[in-house]
Image (tube, rainbow, N blue to C red):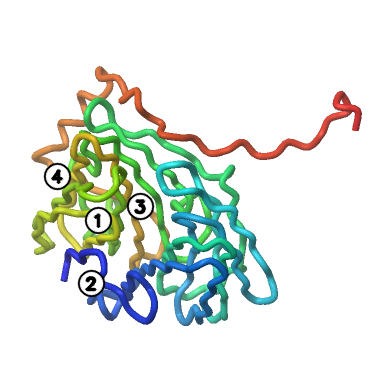
Amino acid sequence: MTHIPAGRGARDGYDLWIDPASAGWAYSALRVLALEPGGQREFATGDSEWVVLPLAGACTVLAGGEAFALHGRADVFSGVSDFCYLPRDAHATVASAEGGRFALAGARCSRRLPARYGPASGVPVELRGAGGASRQVNNFAAAGVFECDRLIAVEVLTPGGNWSSFPPHKHDEAGPHESQLEEVYYYELSGGQGAMGYQRVYPSPRGTTDVLAEVRSGDAVLIPDGWHGPSMAVPGYDMYYLNVMAGPGPSRQWLISDDPAHAWVREGWAAQPLDPRLPLYEAPRAPQPPSEEDGS
């Protein structure tokens, strides 16, 4: 199933469970965990590395004798979140005093890296595109930003009425200018009940995936191959999606190829203003140590 409507991917107490076996591929995984106040969930990381990312609420993550307090956020439309990295072959617990929803983005990997905390202040917030193709990208676990073995994960926020993941692009063929990456899109929409958006994926020279899906909060779309884009946020409803990617390449890179039929769109961006609604928010500033002038 390429489009997984909310609830259809529930398993073992998770609201969404995507692993290589269920997706029919080799690396990428995503789980969404909802905890009631005072709730907790234990799990083994197995052969995969994981990033725990609060979608709504705060939590504490215990792993390998370390505790990571994640301050989180009210929801994905209100701010950048902190997160933590968990290595393969570990045992972890996610606990939340007030309850919330938490994404576990994973990838099968070989190296065992140390567990680490990622502060919200260290997340680069990037503005891409222009005009009606303006969007915001929170590069919390992008290649070159935060070290993982194979996992690449970012958040994209698209104001209502805009298109993102555009021009359509692909990363299904390894080469000097393109990475081979399996990808999960997980969506949330602002505006409450009835909020919706659309996702298009269509066949590339080496891919057969073909879907035009109406997506709602809690839905996911699997992209093993193919040109993907646009992701369409309908007017009045901002769109959020979490991208989780991994692949077999010897180096961890996000290299894409635009569909030649639409690549020309980028040329016009220099003459168009960025959507003034962006950024929806920025990363918080890192705390600064007191200076001598402060009387410390």
Q: Name the residue at 22% across, 29% down.
A: 132
Residues at discs 3 and 1 in contact (Cβ within 8 Å): yes
Q: Nearer the viewer, residue 39 or 85?
A: 39
Q: Earlier in the sequence, mark 4 or mark 3?
A: 3
Tell me the CA gap for discs 4 and 1.
11 Å
Tell me the CA gap for discs 2 and 3.
29 Å
Location of residue 73 with respect to 26 vertically, above or below: above
Q: Residues within 10 Å of mark 2 (few under 14, many from 20)?
A: some
Which residue does the numbered mark 2 point to in the structure image?
8
Tell me the CA gap for discs 4 and 3.
16 Å
Location of residue 8 with respect to 189 vertically, above or below: below
Q: Earlier in the sequence, mark 2 or mark 1?
A: 2
Q: Which mark is residue 259?
A: 4
Mark in the foreground, 2 or 1: 2
Q: Earlier in the sequence, mark 4 or mark 2?
A: 2
Q: Is residue 106 left or right of residue 37?
A: left
Q: Name the residue at 29% across, 32% down.
A: 134
Tell me the CA gap for discs 4 and 2.
31 Å
Amino acid residing under circle 1: His
Q: Residues within 10 Å of mark 1 (few under 14, many from 20)?
A: many
Residues at discs 4 and 1 in contact (Cβ within 8 Å): no
Amino acid residing under circle 4: Asp
Which residue does the numbered mark 1 point to in the structure image?
171
Q: Earlier in the sequence, mark 3 or mark 1?
A: 1
Q: Name the residue at 41% across, 31% down.
A: 279
- The image position of residue 57, as x and y in percent, is 51, 56
Q: Name the residue at 32% across, 47% down.
A: 240
Identify the element where label 1 is drawn.
Answer: loop
Identify the element where label 4 is drawn.
Answer: loop
Q: Which mark is residue 254?
A: 3
- The image position of residue 115, as x and y in percent, is 61, 67
Q: Nearer the viewer, residue 112 or 66?
A: 66
